[in-house]
Amino acid sequence: MDFKKIISYLIAVTLPCSAIPALNHSIKPFNVVAEDNQSEATVSFDAVTGTLYLSGNVKLNEVQKYKGNEQVKTVIAKEGTILPAYCSGLFSEFKATEINLKNADSSQVTNMDSMFFNCPSLKKLDISNFNTSNVTSMYKTFAWCSALESLDVTGLDTSNVIKMNNMFAGCKTLTSIDVSKFNTSKTTNMDGMFSSCSALRSIDIKNFDTSNVTDIGGMFGSCSSLVDIDLSGIDTSNVRSAGGMFYGCDALKKIDMTGCDTSNIEDMGQMFANCPALTDIDLSGFDTSRVEDFGRMFMGCKSLKELDLSNFNTDNAKQMNAMFRNCSSLTTIDLSGFNTSNVTDMSEMFLGCTALRSVNVSSFDTSKVTSLGNMFNNCIALTSVDLSNFITSNVKTMTAMFYQCSSLTTLDLSRFDTSKVKLMQDMCRECKSLKTVDISNFVKSADCTAFSMFRSCPVLTTIYANNDFEYNEDDIYMFIDSKSIVGGNGTKYNDRIYYSEYACVDRNGKPGYFTKNPKAPKPNTTVTTTTTTSTTTTTSTSTTTTTTTSTVMNTNTDTTLSTTTTTAPVKPVTYTLGDVNNDGKINAIDASSVLAYYARISTNQEGGYTEEQKLATDVDHDGKINAVDASNILAYYAYVSTTKEDILSMVEYMKKN
């Protein structure tokens, strides 16, 4: 810093008769005028008033020099100011509270991407005289102007604008936006256009021409004050993505999408997710024939009491994970018309559907599904579920599949093929009414984890199974607190023996908690075939064969359905308890990661952990990931850092503590 020049300047401004030394290269915050070195001045800054003046032919790089400068409080365009054609990021991340561009000539501007992006202090913005007739892109133009109290965009000419995605995203203080005069005839992208406008109470887009729009995903996401919205006149015939369209609209009670053409939509994932007040939605006109992603579509719709999806065409569906998660008012749902032959993920599909008493999934084709984890978790009212047609030969995860299904009394999984499953932990945990479970054809390899699989099932007496359960040192608490279990040869539950060494058929000389089922059926599987159409067969037995073209056989009905299967090598699930980030250390970083994960899932966000990380995190094996796990990891870290004895592993440490 040139203190001599600064002192000279201060003396000069206090003594009018003094000569002001040349300060063209002095520090900008102390200049009365800082201007472009070119012949035309474009930017000048008055440090006394905190005002940045624009004039002449504005140069993008000269304006952006003031990005993040907290001394700039106001930006004013002087008469004759001409904005450049490329205005992308022109005022991005400015700290000013007011920007007045009413005197600026914007007639040559073609790009306004992120022009005012992330101006967190901006309260007033005057663009009332803007000529935007040549603008083609308004991506993130006003995004995250979170303090903006009002915004007049009625004069904007949007007739040539192609991109409007995230245009107003994050304008959290705006209660209204008048876009009724927008010409959107050329617009193709409206993804996230109003997302996170959390104070927005209403929006009128009935005049929007959306005939060319292909993406409306997240368009109203997290507009938490919107009560209702009318999209009945919107042309969605070319839309491909509607994922997250109304995600997090907390106050939304009704959505009218009558007449919307959804025939080309491929993504409906999270479309209505976390709309807890939504009570009325008519989907009878939905054409879902091209939809591949239904994941989390109705997740968190806690007020929906009924849902008619009888017209849904799911022929192309691949994702159905968490589709109805936390729909806690749904009492019944008929999915018998669903074609799930291409679905690979059904994890968490009904998780938290606490009022669900019945669900018809008997026609599900699960031959391509790889994850059934948490599928019925916390379905506390569910009294029965028919899974006799499930084909699980490709499933790798069954974690907590029936966790806390406290009204189930029997569970027949005898046709399940678990030869590829690597995660079975908490599968039937806390099924308080469960008396009998049939897992006759379960195969559990040594690298498959099954800790707490039947934990806290107080009335469970009979487990039909075989001896294909290989021991895993992590399979602790497998039978703990299931004190009614009796093996097929009379072996009763022992408080001191609840590990997986008793996961075997009870017989003389070899006690166990399992009972052999002499009438166990064959598992549902796949068989080689040369036909590609639906057929019937009189064969009641089958052999699993890897083939490019195959037919799914349900041995219960002796009916075959065409499908295609491929076999990929299955990697064993490996993890170190407590080492959440898998860096070979267990320390405070792991604990911090756990707390961050817990904070995310507590607010219905994705935790972001892999299955391996979840296993490594749940150090107390209670089936939950929370602050207790973080505390235990910190305690272990302190122990390792201070002990002078041989260091115990995390598993050993938790057993002792």
Image: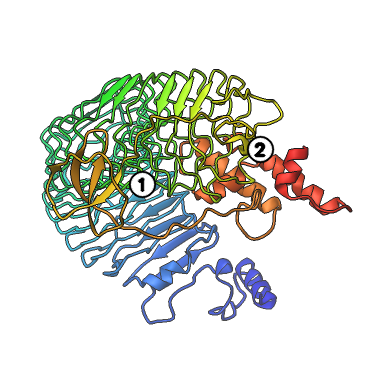
- Return the residue found at the far front: 508
Q: How many marks?
A: 2
Residue 393 is labelled as 1
* Crowding near the residue tagged with mark 2, few <14, some 14–19, many ≥20 C-alpha atoms within 10 Å: some
- Residue at disc 2, secondary structure: loop
* Crowding near the residue tagged with mark 1, few <14, some 14–19, many ≥20 C-alpha atoms within 10 Å: many
- Which residue bears the numbered disc 2? 620
- Compared with 178, 12 (above or below) is below
Q: In the picture, which quadrant includes the N terminus?
A: bottom right
Q: Which residue sits at x=55%, y=44%?
A: 597
Q: With 205 as the anchor, is 399 left or right in this view?
A: right
Q: Amino acid at mark 1?
A: Ser
Q: Which residue sits at x=51%, y=55%?
A: 572
- Residue at disc 1, secondary structure: loop
User: Of label 1 and label 2, which has the lower sequence position?
Assistant: 1
**Percent x, y for residue 256?**
18, 30
